[in-house]
């Protein structure tokens, strides 16, 4: 990549403007399903910057997605910068910048990254650096589970509001994840007929939903050991996990319901539908063995996926990263599930997660070094140039 261009991009990234944008986004609380005000703030920032902004309901009119396009005017591919504006449901921490670090709710996950991607868009426009094609900038709600269900990303895919490839500035700086496990959050509800009753007054033969819950947990524990045999060289192995079991109102009451909650994760190339079918079969067996009824909410947050390590997107990113830092990133796996899982596994659109080396996601202590936001802005701008300019 041309060193002169790299130097130009670095000089054009405006550190203070980037920081001000991140602070402006973080200061608007946006728990999942309530990110409308943050989306409005982002649209206002883009409009003030001279970008033409479009809004689409995308299955959630309470917070229409934000969409802006930088078009080179030359036919070519579209690279999408995409981020989620919603946050986990924790008490709001207002933004502050101390010791050259941005603190506050969503500074790491992921408004800092969104601000960096927006700064890259500004730089590309200022330098008229995009050789061909377009950059599509999008932001949305409904990311964080279990409150959100990914509906806006799925609607964007369905409605064609997507690029040929996607970059997501989540808080993962290394490695470059080209594969990831799928994730579903489940809640199994175990029920029996009748009403809650004192333990000594139970009719003979009354199913015990607490025992059935314990039986299910044990079955899942045994199954997890079997699932570990299904391995992938980058992402590890399949798993199932129980983190919560609840039942009853008092120690000597026989309740009518028991709730078991946890996760099911799987490696590529396994399909989400096959995973759900297998889970349902296990629950049916436990229900038959315990004389109970078991219903399950099986919310797929994102499917397992793998991106071709020699794809146009990976090549463009590595070219940009090498130009900026002197070396490429090692290839690896994504430890969490994000919207890239949906783009790739359901939309067939290659997606890479790369963002600031930020800390504290899903806690009250999120932090994103401003140096990292600047670095991400540089690498995103250069990736767009490489991706859109490849012959």
Image (tube, helix red, strand yellow):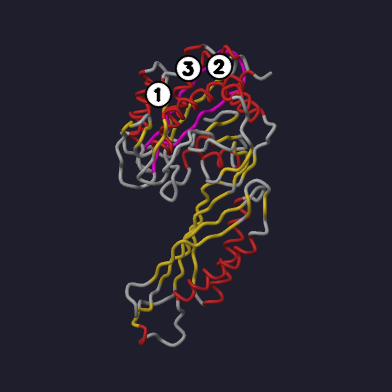
Residue for point 55% across, 20% down: 134
Categorize mark 1 by other alpha carbons within 10 Å: few (<14), some (14-19), many (20+).
many
Decide: is 345 above or below 44: below
Q: Residue at x 46, y 15 (%)?
A: 12
Q: Which residue is mark 2?
A: 6
Q: Secondary structure at mark 3?
A: helix
Q: Earlier in the sequence, mark 3 or mark 2?
A: 2
Q: Residue furthest front?
A: 99
Nearest to the eye among marks 3 and 2: give it.
Answer: 2
Residue at x 38% of width, y 43% of height: 32
Q: Secondary structure at mark 1?
A: helix
Badge count: 3
Span of residues in magenta = 62-87
Q: Nearer the viewer, mark 2 or mark 1?
A: 2
Task: Please state the horizontal and vertical placement of residue 348, each as a whole percent of the image.
Answer: 62, 37
Name the quadrant containing residue 198. Answer: bottom left
Q: Pick whichever, 108 or 223, lies toward us.
A: 108
Instruction: Tell me how far mark 3 sits from mark 2, CA to CA.
Output: 11 Å
How many residues crowd around disc 2 within 10 Å: few (fewer than 14), some, or many (20 or more)? Answer: some
Q: CA distance from mark 1 to mark 3?
A: 11 Å
In the picture, which quadrant includes the N terminus? Answer: top right
Decide if residue 371 is on the left or right side of residue 352: left
Q: Secondary structure at mark 2?
A: helix
Q: Give residue 18's mark.
A: 1
Q: Is residue 385 magenta?
A: no
Asked if disc 2 and disc 1 are in contact, CB closer than 8 Å, the reply is no
Q: Which residue is mark 3?
A: 123
Q: Earlier in the sequence, mark 2 or mark 1?
A: 2
Asked if the magenta segment contains residue 68, the reply would be yes
The location of residue 94, given as percent across then percent down, is: 29, 37
Q: Quadrant of residue 282?
A: bottom right
Numbered label attached to residue 149? none
């Amino acid at each position: 990549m041309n060193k002169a261009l790299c130097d130009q991009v670095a000089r054009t990234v405006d550190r203070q403007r980037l920081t001000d944008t991140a602070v402006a986004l973080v200061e608007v609380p946006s728990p999942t399903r309530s990110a409308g005000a943050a989306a409005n703030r982002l649209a206002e920032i883009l409009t003030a910057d001279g970008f033409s902004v479009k809004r689409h309901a995308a299955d959630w009119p309470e917070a229409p997605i934000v969409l802006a396009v930088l078009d080179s005017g030359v036919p070519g591919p579209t690279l999408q910068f995409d981020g989620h504006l919603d946050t986990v449901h924790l008490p709001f921490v207002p933004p502050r910048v101390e010791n050259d670090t941005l603190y506050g709710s969503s500074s790491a996950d992921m408004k800092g990254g969104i601000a960096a991607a927006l700064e890259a868009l500004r730089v590309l426009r200022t330098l008229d650096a995009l050789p061909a094609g377009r950059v599509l900038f999008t932001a949305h709600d409904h990311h964080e589970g279990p409150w959100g269900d990914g509906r806006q990303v799925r609607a964007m895919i369905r409605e064609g509001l997507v690029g040929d490839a996607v970059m997501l500035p989540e808080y993962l700086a290394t490695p470059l994840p080209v594969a990831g496990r799928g994730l579903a959050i489940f809640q199994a509800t175990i029920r029996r007929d009748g009403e809650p009753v004192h333990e000594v007054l139970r009719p003979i033969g009354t199913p015990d939903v607490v025992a059935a819950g314990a039986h299910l947990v044990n079955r899942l524990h045994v199954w997890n050991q079997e699932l570990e045999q299904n391995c992938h060289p980058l992402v590890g192995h399949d798993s199932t996990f129980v983190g919560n079991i609840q039942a009853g109102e008092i120690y000597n009451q026989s309740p009518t319901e028991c709730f078991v909650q946890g996760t099911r994760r799987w490696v590529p190339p396994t399909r989400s539908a096959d995973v759900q079918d297998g889970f349902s079969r296990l629950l049916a067996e436990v229900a038959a063995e315990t004389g109970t009824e078991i219903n399950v909410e099986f919310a797929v947050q994102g499917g397992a996926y793998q991106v071709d390590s020699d794809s146009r997107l990976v090549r463009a990113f590595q070219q940009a990263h090498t130009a900026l830092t002197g070396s490429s990133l090692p290839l690896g796996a994504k430890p969490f599930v994000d919207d890239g899982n949906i783009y790739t596994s359901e939309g067939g659109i290659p997606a890479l997660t790369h963002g600031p080396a930020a800390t504290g996601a899903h806690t009250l202590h999120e932090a994103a070094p401003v140096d990292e936001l600047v670095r991400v802005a540089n690498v995103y701008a250069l990736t767009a140039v490489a991706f859109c300019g490849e012959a």
